[in-house]
Image (cartoon, helix red, strand yellow):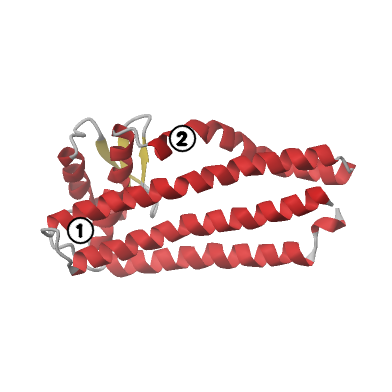
Amino acid sequence: MFGMISPMYLLLIVASLVLGFGTQAYIKRQYKKYSQVPSLSGLTGAQAARRMLDANGLANVSVQMVGGELSDHFDPRSNVVSLSEGVYKGSSIASTAVACHECGHAVQHARAYAPARIRNTIVPVVNFASNIWMFALIIGVILGVIGFVWVAVIMYVAVLAFQLVTLPVELDASARALAYVKAGQGNMPSPETSGAKKVLTAAALTYVAAALISVLQLLWLLGMARR
């Protein structure tokens, strides 16, 4: 059990904390900054979302408000784009960017975008693996059974695969959102397009950081399994 507390593991913890808190602080800073910059269109996030959905022939997708901050998401099971209150009611560059990003996921679902379909398919497996891998690891270490450690490794690979396939899904949704915002500006560079891009890039960095943390964690698990 004491082999788990190694300098390499402590380094992993520090790196994970720096990446995690650093990216979260960055996206909150960018979101706060552009939440104070009015959108040139004057539309609220809800109105921008409705227009983007309708422009893509998705009148069947509804838009609703949910609690929390940056709790925005699209649920493919109910075909609902859920926007946090600040995004739903706000008429800022950040509100438009976030709302259109979630609509980008709705468009992916409607167009059967392959990475999004893969991600949705493996969700049940990943939910199971993410809840079990640590227990398998602890049992393997305490009992000295290498088989359990390798089970933990295999389960964690599933978690990492989910995070890796999430990257193109999120990047594509942001690209669709940015294209819509840019089209509203006559496909010309503008302060609104630039601001929206910064907000969406900051959001994407959180997924990149999560994937990097998982890669580091997997390397540590492989090292433990080999020992």
Of callouts 2 and 1, the N-terminal one: 1
Q: Secondary structure at mark 2?
A: helix
Total labels: the figure holds 2
What amino acid is at disc 1?
Ser
Is 218 left, or right, of 106 in this rendering? right
Task: Look at 26% across and 66% down and name the residue there.
Answer: 195
Left or right placement of residue 171 versus residue 133 in this view? left
Q: Residues within 10 Å of mark 2 (few under 14, many from 20)?
A: some
Asked which secondary structure carries label 1, the reply is: loop
- Residue 209, relative to residue 128: is it above or below? below
Q: Amino acid at mark 2?
A: Ile
Q: Nearer the viewer, residue 17 or 213?
A: 213
Confirm whether residue 184 shows in the render: yes
Residue at coordinates 68% horizontally, 63% vertically from top-left? 12
Q: CA distance from mark 2 to mark 1?
A: 34 Å
- Residue 91 is labelled as 1
- Whether residue 5 is situated above or below residue 162 in the rendered picture: below
Where residue 209 appears, as percent x and y from the top left, is 52, 59
Q: Is residue 99 visible?
A: no
Is 220 displayed left or right of 208 in the figure? right
Q: Which residue is mark 2?
A: 118
Q: Is residue 24 left or right of residue 226?
A: left
Which numbered mark, 2 or 1, is in the foreground of this view?
A: 2
Quadrant hosting residue 86: bottom left
Task: Find residue 151 and report its horizontal and vertical position in percent.
Answer: 74, 38
